[in-house]
Image: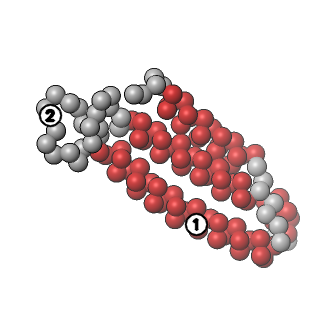
Amino acid sequence: MMIGNFPYIVAMLLVAIGIYALLFKRNLIKLVIGISLVETGVNLFLVTLGYRTAGIAPIYTYAPNAKPMVLPTPQALTLTSIVIGLATTALLLSFVVFIYRHYGTLNVREIKELRG
């Protein structure tokens, strides 16, 4: 049973916290966490859009005609988004490790000052 607009509110909060981290934090790890929070909020929003009350899974072929089916498109988009998000996060973390080894810091301001 869905509790009103609660999933939409949680999705908005996750996106807002992620954007806050992207705008106001200067640590590279916190920036990667902010990007992951935004991705999670968008995924939750997509899943919530496809929800139907008392809906059944779209893979169920012998479904009764009276019951609505959950939309499969947002589920497929969410699975694709999860895979892309995982690859993006892994790539960003590898960049963070490289930057830390090269500059010895994770602070964005200090890295900008070291550029010359």
Amino acid under disc 2 = Pro
Q: Quadrant of residue 109?
A: bottom right
Residue under the point 27% across and 42% down: 57
Q: Position of residue 6 (x, y in %)?
A: 51, 28
Would residue 112 be found to the left or right of residue 43 on screen?
Answer: right
| Quadrant, the C terminus | bottom right
Would residue 93 be found to the left or right of residue 39 on screen?
Answer: right
| Quadrant, the N terminus | top left
Amino acid under disc 1 = Ala
Q: Quadrant of residue 13?
A: top right
**Measured along the vertical axis of the image, is residue 44 above or below residue 76?**
above
Question: Which residue is tagged 1?
Answer: 90
2 or 1: tag closer to the N-terminus: 2
Residue under the point 72% across and 54% down: 30
Picture mark count:
2
Res. 112 in view: no
Q: Position of residue 86 (x, y in %)?
A: 52, 61
At numbered mark 1, what does the secondary structure look like: helix, strand or loop? helix
**Measured along the vertical axis of the image, is residue 9 above or below residue 72?**
above
- Residue 58 image label: none
**Measured along the vertical axis of the image, is residue 25 above or below residue 97?**
above
Labels 2 and 1 touching (C-beta < 8 A)? no
Question: Which residue is tagged 2?
Answer: 64
At numbered mark 2, what does the secondary structure look like: helix, strand or loop? loop
Q: Out of 23 and 52, give the one closest to the viewer.
A: 52
CA gap between label 2 and label 1 equals: 43 Å
Q: Residue furthest top?
A: 4
